[in-house]
Image (cartoon, rainbow, N blue to C red):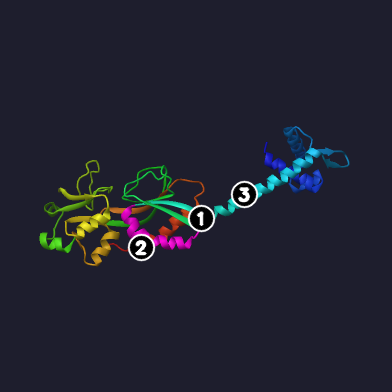
Amino acid sequence: MDTFNYMRAFRRIVELGSLAKAAEDLDMSSAGLSKQLRALEAHLGAVLIQRTTRKMSLTDTGAAYYAECCRLLDELDTLEKSIKQQAGRVAGRLRVNAPVSFALSVLSPLLARFLRQYPELRLDLAMEDRLVDAVGLGFDVSIRLRAQLDDSSLIARRLASLTQVLCAAPSYLAQRGHPGSVDDLRGHDCLSYSLADSPGPVPDDDASHPADPFGAPTRVQANNSLMLRDLLEAGLGIGGLPSFLAAPAIAEGRLARVLPDLPSAPRQVYAVYPTSRHLQPKVKAFVDFLAQHLPAAMGGDC
């Protein structure tokens, strides 16, 4: 039986002093309400209301039960109201996972604006370049920079696009020369990002046989793009950087483009989060904020 609804029906009978009036108030028949009352009494094993053809009155047990019904139902109503109010608030702890270089270079200035917009929100940001189990580790949102995502039960929303830019320091190019083709890269020192889903800016059509990005031995391989940028700026070789790191360095003359007409492997910035019938307001607010502000924050391509 639906105990809480039966309790509510019993409460209305007592408050209105009439089974017929209570039935009208609850938009049901008197016979149906009488049946509910009998079922409630049978469930409790006690008579709650003495009924005669002329009047009805509470038994002592009924009076005690009525008092407890009022207390419990009022507490339940208060709880439901509170939950519904909280369901619309952007508050609580938001756990986010993002790549190190992207978080430090792009997310960092945006997060302050986001947190000022939602003062009741607490942010827990974990920076990790390797792909992690977002659900298993309890993250609300995971930011991923990939050419494509593996099939999964997670929801992925595309936020922005980026490209890989082949570049080197002007000092390196002055010493070693500018390559005129992909084949020329085999005579250069090459740097690569070890965690990329595609090994570099030169497309690799045979994903089952991953190679270094240029068909030549890689001098430096690192799992962090900021480290690669610093090594490229130091003149250690030629390598690919995501456009959000390459563009500022090129604009300031610290790096120069190599083979600018070379097709680059497109990548997307995704927000990945667990499936849910009711998307949490804090997650929706964060993902919507990123979708609105990320493209401008990342700047244009080189």
Query: What amino acid type is highlighted by mark number 1?
Result: Ala
Q: Quadrant of the C terminus?
A: bottom left
Mark in front: 2 vs 1: 1
Looking at marks 1 and 3 on the same chain, the residue that comes earlier in the sequence is marked by: 3
Task: Give the extent of the magenta segment.
Answer: 99-120
Q: CA distance from mark 2 to mark 1?
A: 25 Å
Residue 80, numbered circle:
3
Q: Residue at x 19, y 51 (%)?
A: 220
Asked if marks 2 and 1 touch (Cβ < 8 Å), the reply is: no
Q: CA distance from mark 2 to mark 3?
A: 41 Å
Looking at marks 2 and 3 on the same chain, the residue that comes earlier in the sequence is marked by: 3
Horizontal relation, residue 152 to residue 300: left or right: right
Query: What amino acid type is highlighted by mark number 3?
Result: Glu
Mark in front: 1 vs 3: 1
Residue 302, numbered circle:
none
Horizontal relation, residue 174 to residue 36: left or right: left
Dot 2 falls on a residue whose secondary structure is helix
Residue ID for mark 2:
297
Residue 64 vs 120, above or below: the answer is above
Q: Quadrant of the N terminus?
A: top right
